[in-house]
Image: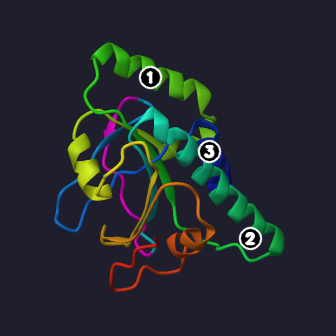
């Protein structure tokens, strides 16, 4: 149920992404809503699902992805087919370099808008935005980037743009497998 609430909160704000240690050993770091810099560990079996937004314009797509994931998990719960240990969804908005005053303002604004039980899934990126762009292979900053990572931090499925149910099935699948398998 908490996973559903986190997904709903992501949808409500249109924010998303995550922090991981990549297979090449680089760590991607972000600021949590308490203002602490963190490296978010991957689930030891499932990795993580990242919904990444790089611009204000991407928020409608990231919001729709959050809503669709929450809806999918509700449907599974109603049908009694929900995963007891689902792929975690961690949300980050990549701002890039902005002033210290704006950082505090944005962090406090988000903290006030996000339900307390969902705060641990939201992160902000001010430094190292280029590493995030590399991870997502960004071509259009106005699109949502939804990445499925395996437990080793490798991107094994990727979708760029609006919600697509075919991609959702791949992104939330049980296992990433040994090879990278683009969702779209």
Mark 3 vs mark 2: in front: 3
| Vertical position of residue 5 compared to residue 115: above or below | below
Tell which circle, 1 or 3, labels the residue nearer the N-terminal end: 3
In the image, 170: left or right of 142? right
Query: Is residue 37 highlighted in magenta?
Result: yes
Farthest top residue in view? 101
Residue extending furthest toward the right? 78
Mark 3 is surrounded, within 10 Å at the Cα level, by few (under 14), some (14 to 19) or many (20 or more) other residues, namely: many
Tell me which corner region of the image, top left, top right, bottom left or bottom right, holds residue 169.
Answer: bottom right
What crowding class fits label 1: few (fewer than 14 Cα within 10 Å), some (14-19), or many (20 or more)? some
Quadrant of res 1:
bottom right
Residue at image point 52% right, 39% down: 59
Residue 131 percent across, percent down from the top left: 22, 49
Mark found first going from the N terminus, 1 or 2: 2
Viewer-side label of 1, 3: 3
Residue located at (72% from left, 58% from top)? 71
Residue 177 or residue 39, whichever sits in front: 177
Left or right of 2 in this view: 33: left
Q: Secondary structure at mark 3?
A: helix
The stretch in magenta equals: 35-45
Q: Which mark is residue 106?
A: 1
Q: Which residue is mark 3?
A: 11
Q: Answer yes or no: do the residues labelled 1 and 3 have beta carbons within 8 Å? A: no
**Circle 2 sits on which residue?**
76
Q: CA distance from mark 1 to mark 3?
A: 18 Å
**Residue at 63%, 59% in the rendered image:** 69
Residue 27 is left or right of residue 156, and the answer is: left
What is the CA distance from the residue labelled 3 to the residue labelled 2? 18 Å
């Amino acid at each position: 149920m908490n996973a559903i609430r986190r997904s709903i909160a992501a949808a409500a704000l249109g924010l998303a992404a995550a922090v991981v240690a990549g297979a090449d050993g680089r760590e991607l770091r972000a600021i949590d809503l308490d203002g602490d810099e963190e490296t978010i560990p991957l689930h030891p079996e499932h990795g993580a699902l990242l919904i990444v937004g790089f611009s204000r314009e991407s928020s409608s797509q990231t919001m729709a992805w959050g809503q669709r994931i929450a809806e999918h998990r509700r449907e599974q719960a109603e049908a009694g087919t929900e995963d007891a240990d689902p792929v975690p969804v961690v949300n980050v908005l990549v701002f890039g370099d902005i002033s210290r005053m704006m950082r505090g303002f944005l962090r406090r604004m988000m903290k006030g808008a996000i339900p307390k039980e969902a705060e641990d899934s939201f992160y902000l990126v001010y430094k190292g935005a280029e590493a995030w762009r590399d991870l997502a292979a960004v071509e259009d900053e106005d699109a949502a980037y939804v990445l499925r990572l395996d437990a080793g931090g490798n991107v094994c499925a990727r979708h760029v743009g609006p919600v697509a149910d075919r991609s959702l099935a791949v992104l939330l699948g049980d296992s990433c497998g040994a090879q990278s398998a683009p969702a779209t």
